[in-house]
Amino acid sequence: MKRIALLPSGSVSHEAVLYLMKNEPVELIHHKLISDVFMSTVEGKSDYSVIPIENTIEGSVSLHMDWLVNEVDIPMQAEWIYPSIQNLIGDASEFRADDGTIDFSKIKRIYSHPVATAQCRQFLAKFAPTAELESAGSTSEGARIVKDNPGKGWAAIGTTLGASTHGLDFLAETITDHDNNFTRFVLIGREPIEVPHSPEHVKTSILVTLPEDVPGALHQVLSTFAWRRLNLSRIESRPTKKKLGNYYFYIDVLASAESVLLTAAMAEIEALGCQVRLLGSYPGFTYTTEKSEV
């Protein structure tokens, strides 16, 4: 049985991996902090780790990207896109108005992961403008904090699974600012994994560090993909953390690392004096309602 490390029970990561693995027998190992999720696989306590790395609204999860690049050296084995549907949850009895509706003005504090909170800015500004917004390690951790502190006027932003896991009520459902709010997850591990879905594509992620003081180096790198008609689905710069002004480029290519074209492109980039690191070549999956039963 495969062991998979992830954030706490009831988090979006939890919902997402249930979808990915469907009814496959796996052992889920929950951790409070994303650093512990990473280290679980690094130390061999789990076979894989579930890492959210990108969101429709907030873009890249920079902390997680930096961990993938700077702290661990474990390849990506799969990616999947899953809807991030957030709700305002808590003990409804604390916030009832005389007419039985929820009086949002009674909410004094709201806990959640900063990315989830940012996805709900418009709702919070309209319905809970005076509530203090507190950070938690995950949406599920925020729900747990609220559950453990009854009677204080605290609420959380979390998933449907998180509400049921911690026995909390829905104060407001689907409060994200946009309907098309999805999160991209990657599964990292040392061995390929079989997933009970048909992949939509194969993607390869590489890290390119340009040589110093070479004019037009990035243009030359991109040209190696362009003339071979290799499609890039993402390119992002991040600081190398070694010297001010030095950046690496994270690049997603819609091709297998075993393809002749991509192999040649990577060789050409290295010939330009760049450093190239393969982060993984893996299948990609996208959530659909037809496949959503877990």
Image (cartoon, rainbow, N blue to C red):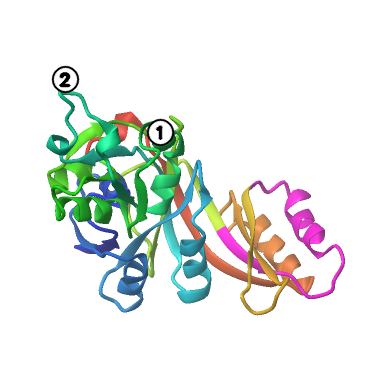
* Residue at x-position 36% and y-position 65%: 34
Q: Which residue is mark 2?
A: 99
Amino acid at the residue labelled 2: Asp
> From this viewpoint, which residue is outermost toward the top?
99
Left/right placement of residue 281 relative to residue 243 reads left
Tag 2 secondary structure: loop
Image vertical order of residue 94 relative to residue 252, above or below: above
Quarter of the image that includes the C terminus: top left
Q: Is residue 160 visible?
A: no
Q: Which residue is mark 1?
A: 123
Tag 1 secondary structure: helix
Left/right placement of residue 216 relative to residue 48 reads right
Which span of residues is magenta-colored?
205-232
- Residue 224 locus on image (x, y percent): 76, 57
- Residue 268 locus on image (x, y percent): 75, 66
Q: Residues within 10 Å of mark 1 (few under 14, many from 20)?
A: some
Q: Is residue 231 visible?
A: yes
